[in-house]
Image (cartoon, rainbow, N blue to C red):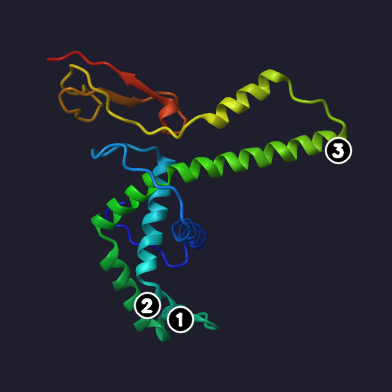
Amino acid sequence: MGGDVPSTFGSASSSSSSNGQTDKQVERLPMPSRNPLPLSASQEAQVRDIFYARVRRQCTEEIKAFAECALGRTFSVPFACRAPHRVMNNCMKLHATPAEQDAAREEWFALRMERARERERKARRKAEQEAFLREWWGLPEKDREEARRELEKLNQKERVEQLRKTSLRCGGPGLDWVPQGYEAVAPSPTSGQDSSPGFRTTITLDAF
């Protein structure tokens, strides 16, 4: 996320959803650790969306001025709205700082309880719709084993990678340097898999 500047038109839906989460009173949890925690690609994308939304909230007036200038224009926007566009970009560059990125990451960790509840609501809504369709079309009910697996998946917590303490010093060929007393976590060699913790292999290295 280093040096990223949010696009004005790219993620309106993510910006509005983030605003909805922050405007209402939601339960916020503390950071699990003050040390940097590695996240999966999808989790980093969520943090980046929060970062973009936070920057846009601080440049609301500049974005609104550019949008009003661009309203009803097509090819003449780069020429007629050059000044408000420059002001808007300068505002977003000014607020797109590493401190704002850290604040977005902390907000992502603080809202993990709200995300868990949202996943639970969606899963239960999906189960209700499936049950209705099965009843409507006279399809057989799900077996107990499949229902149990879905319930266990629903109750799983959001996973975040962490470096676990060992008596080792650092990684070997092809691995990033690992501080002394920690364990190296390397991607699984299986191609085409997501980089989430579920597809990662823990490697134990010999000390030297």
Instruction: Determine if residue 68 is in view.
Output: yes
Marks 2 and 3, Cα distance to the nearest angstrom?
54 Å
The disc placed on residue 206 is: none
The kind of secondary structure element at disc 1 is: helix
Residue drawn 36% across and 71% down?
Answer: 59
Q: State the residue at coordinates (43%, 67%).
A: 8
Q: Is residue 10 above or below residue 182?
A: below
Q: Is residue 77 placed above or below 9 in the rendered structure?
A: below
Mark 1 highlights which residue?
77
The C terminus is located in which quarter?
Answer: top left
Contact? badges 1 and 2 (CB < 8 Å) = yes
Q: Nearer the viewer, mark 1 or mark 2?
A: 2
Give the x, y percent position of residue 130: 74, 36
Q: Which label's residue is closer to the chain start, 1 or 3?
A: 1
Q: Which residue is mark 3?
A: 136
Residue that appears at 74% across and 40% down: 129
Q: Amino acid at mark 2?
A: His
How many numbered marks does the figure carry? 3
Viewer-proximal residue, 125 or 199?
Answer: 125
Where is residue 132? Give x, y as percent.
79, 38
Q: Which residue is mark 2?
A: 85
Residue type pointed to by label 3 = Trp
* Residue toward you, 147 or 93: 147
Q: Residues within 10 Å of mark 3 (few under 14, many from 20)?
A: few
Distance, label 1 to label 2, CA atoms, is: 9 Å
Label 1 to label 3, Cα distance in Å?
53 Å
Secondary structure of the residue carrying tag 2 is: helix
Cβ atoms under marks 1 and 3 closer than 8 Å: no
Q: Earlier in the sequence, mark 1 or mark 2?
A: 1
The residue positioned 35% from the left and 31% from the top of the image is 161
Q: Callout 1: 10 Å neighbours few (<14), some, many (20+)?
A: some
